[in-house]
Amino acid sequence: MTDTTSPATDAAPTAEPEVLASVTDGVGRITLNRPRALNALSYAMIGLITHHLEAWRDDSEVALVVLDGAGDRGFCAGGDIRALWENASAGSNADSRTFFREEYRLNAIIARYPKPVVAIMDGITMGGGIGLGGHASIRIVTERSRLAMPETRIGFSPDVGGTWLLGRAPGELGTHLGLNAATMTPADAIAAGFADYLVPSAALPHLVQALQERADPGSPPEIVLLFDETPGPSELEARREWIDACYSASTVAEIIDRLRARPESEAARAADELEALSPTGLTATLAGIRSARAASSLEQALEGEYRTVAWLIDQPDLREGIRAQVVDKDRTPRWSPATLAEIDTDAVLAAIAQEPPEPLWA
């Protein structure tokens, strides 16, 4: 048995480490340790997680990895979007591109890791949290889990491999989830392909202990199945008929028109939501999900996301969206262009197809 704790970040020496890492009985455990911030990812945390995964890749003392978050409110609420706003306001978008490159590379490392990665997405799991947990080989939610790709709320687009997951959700569920930034219950997350197992939160310590002991049955999936519970019905899946009918349209404007024509009250609410969001962000998001659906690999989808976000961080809607939701919190963003009718879709598609100044994988 060995035990190693990650070094502190650039914060004061007395500050709690943002990432805790240890190896116990063959299980490497990485715990996001910013519970007061719902374990939101900082740039330093991305580097620390990457460091430990790379160190354990060929370590015979580590047979599997458990990835979880401190506290009982959230696994990871996403990345530091205030830093995005500060970078954009200061003309330092190159720093944001650096953040995205390191984060996306970490997402790919988790997806291709040679050892089982057990992601425990207990509580709030959004944006960057999906990038960590959604690509793991064993993805666990609890009754407290709430998952979402909420990027369109700030004039942005799903990333961290989110388009890869959204594009592979049944029917048009992923298109709805991505455009409307809809929140998934545990049952929804399993139905949409964002999670594999539902384990009660009270059983999580026992699950980790069982993974360390690895008694019969011995494989990680078999052990998780001992704690797995059948989720209740998915409300998202129950709405699939009108979601598939509406979100299969080729443009966001047509999706809204189809939603308005439906008799379901949920469809009307979905149309209201879309009309309140950034036309630029919605247009880029729909294109991104459709492109990722045709991608041959997660890495290819990440490349498309990187092109998209490298362009979006230079657009006014991201700064305005973060200002309205996080900085001033007035919840009244003023989008530019303000309506879908003013969007030049061809220009947006051409812009998000351009290669960023720095390549993703170099």
Image: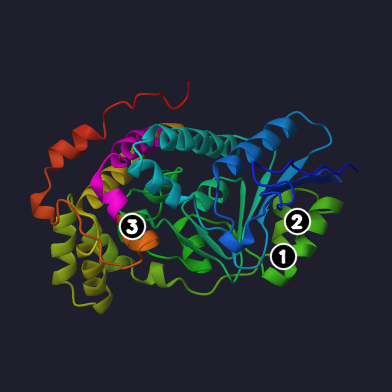
Measure the alpha-carbon separation of dots 1 and 2: 7 Å
User: Which quadrant holds residue 47?
Assistant: top right
Who comes first in sequence, dot 3 or dot 1? 1
Q: What residue is rendered at 75% in x and 28% in y?
A: 58
**Residue 8 image point, x, y percent:** 71, 43
From where the camera sits, is residue 114 visible? no
Residue 165 appears left or right of 75: left
Above-or-below relation of 263 to 194: below
Residue 360 appears left or right of 269: right
Q: What residue is rendered at 33% in x and 57% in y?
A: 323
Mark 2 is surrounded, within 10 Å at the Cα level, by few (under 14), some (14 to 19) or many (20 or more) other residues, namely: some
Residue annotated with mark 2? 223
Residue annotated with mark 1? 227
Q: In the rendered structure, are the residues bearing label 1 and label 2 in contact, judged by CB atoms less than 8 Å apart?
A: yes
What span is in magenta? 301-320
Mark 3 is surrounded, within 10 Å at the Cα level, by few (under 14), some (14 to 19) or many (20 or more) other residues, namely: some
Residue type at the position of mark 2: Ile
**Residue 96 image point, x, y percent:** 42, 38
| Residue 32 included in the magenta stretch of the image | no
Who comes first in sequence, dot 3 or dot 2? 2
Above-or-below relation of 198 to 33: below
Measure the alpha-carbon separation of dots 3 and 2: 45 Å
The mark lying in front, picked from 3 and 1, is 3
In this view, which residue lies farthest toward the top?
Answer: 362
Front-most of 123 and 96? 96
Residue type at the position of mark 1: Phe
Q: In the rendered structure, are the residues bearing label 3 and label 2 in contact, judged by CB atoms less than 8 Å apart?
A: no
Mark 1 is surrounded, within 10 Å at the Cα level, by few (under 14), some (14 to 19) or many (20 or more) other residues, namely: some
**Residue 276 image point, x, y percent:** 22, 64
The mark lying in front, picked from 3 and 2, is 3
